[in-house]
Image (cartoon, rainbow, N blue to C red):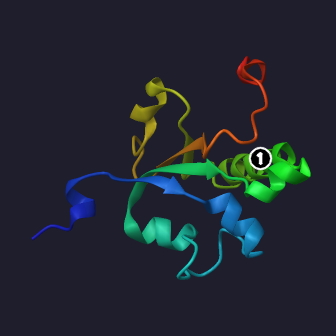
Amino acid sequence: MPLVKEMYPLVDAHQDVAWSMLAYSRPFASPPSNFMLTESSWRHSGLRWAWCTLFVLPEYIAQGIAKRAISVQFEIYWNLLAHYSGWLVPIGERANIGLIGEFGGQTGLSVLLEGADAIESPAELEP
């Protein structure tokens, strides 16, 4: 009987990778752990698309450092995409979804904002 990962593309809609890397001082290339999915666990699972969060603690908002925390996490994701460019594919729009696994074994990475606490006004969302 085939494994699920061989029959269907595996998608994880909530990964706190950057947050975990910062909070636990662990690189993405660390061995798997109970509290953070890592490069090896992604590769072993056959993950094909990960939605990775930008997350801030409520106290960051009160301290006025929420935007900085978001920027640091976003930079982590860009660095991962650059470092693992043959494996990780940025998925930011529908047209890119077809790139996942096109050359075999690639994993898509999308970044999303968990909560809107770091956004102070709608104008900040404008390109």
Q: Is residue 73 left or right of residue 10?
A: right
Query: In terms of depth relative to the viewer, which is nearer, 66 or 62?
Result: 62
Q: Which residue was labeled with disc 1?
A: 70
Residue lying farthest to the left in this orientation: 1
Residue depicted at 15% across the width and 67% down the height: 2
Query: In terms of depth relative to the viewer, which is nearer, 12 or 38?
Result: 12
Q: Give the structural element (helix, strand or loop) at label 1.
A: helix
Picture coordinates of residue 86 (x, y %)? 58, 50
Residue type highlighted by circle 1: Ile
Residue depicted at 38% across the width and 62% down the height: 46
Quadrant of the image for the C terminus? Answer: top right
Picture coordinates of residue 49 (x, y %)? 44, 49
Query: In terms of depth relative to the viewer, which is nearer, 15 or 95?
Result: 15
Q: Quadrant of residue 60?
A: bottom right
Please, is residue 80 above or below residue 78 in the view?
A: below
Residue depicted at 68% across the width and 52% down the height: 55
Total labels drawn: 1
Please, is residue 12 above or below residue 44 in the view?
A: above
Picture coordinates of residue 75 (x, y %)? 78, 47
Q: Is residue 41 left or right of residue 117?
A: left
Please, is residue 2 above or below residue 7 in the view?
A: below
Query: In terms of depth relative to the viewer, which is nearer, 36 or 96?
Result: 36
Q: Is residue 12 left or right of residue 62?
A: left
